[in-house]
Image: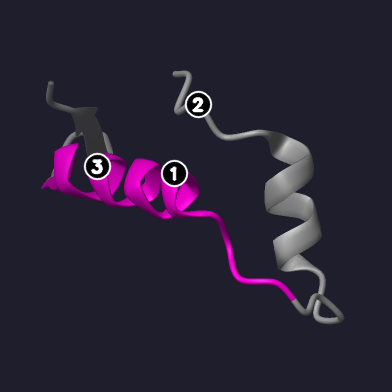
Amino acid sequence: MNLGIDSEDLFRFSNEEHKEEPRQHIIDSLLRFSRSLEVKSSKMVGKIESVKN
């Protein structure tokens, strides 16, 4: 899945020494992904994760 987020940006923001706020497009991409992600429990396989468009 391509969320349009640069992995270098995520790495930089995960570092505790950052002094910047994440750019708005990163926040928007993460929010869109979180709204489309669905996780359900299943007795047979544990958890089922799906992304709805």
Q: Which quarter of the image is occupied by the C terminus?
A: top left
Real-space Cα distance between discs 3 and 1? Answer: 10 Å
Q: Secondary structure at mark 2?
A: loop
Q: Residues within 10 Å of mark 3 (few under 14, many from 20)?
A: few
Q: On the picture, is 44 further left or further right than 23?
A: left
Numbered circles on residues, count: 3
Image coordinates for residue 23, horizontal then vertical, percent: 54, 55
Q: Which residue is under mark 3?
A: 32
> Residue at the spot x=71%, y=72% of the render?
20
Image coordinates for residue 41, horizontal then vertical, percent: 14, 49
Q: Where are the magenta residues, as a range?
A: 20-41
Report if the CB atoms under discs 1 and 2 are less than 8 Å apart. yes
Is 23 contained in the magenta span?
Answer: yes
Q: Which residue is under mark 1?
A: 25
Q: Amino acid at mark 2?
A: Gly
Q: Residues within 10 Å of mark 1 (few under 14, many from 20)?
A: few
Is residue 49 in sight in this rendering?
Answer: yes
> Which of label 1 and label 2 is nearer to you?
1
Q: Quadrant of residue 50?
A: top left
Report if the CB atoms under discs 3 and 2 are less than 8 Å apart. no
Q: Quadrant of residue 8?
A: top right
Q: Amino acid at mark 1?
A: His
Q: Which residue is under mark 2?
A: 4
Q: Secondary structure at mark 1?
A: helix
Sequence-wise, the earlier of marks 3 and 2 is 2
Q: On the picture, is 38 further left or further right than 10?
A: left
Q: Secondary structure at mark 3?
A: helix
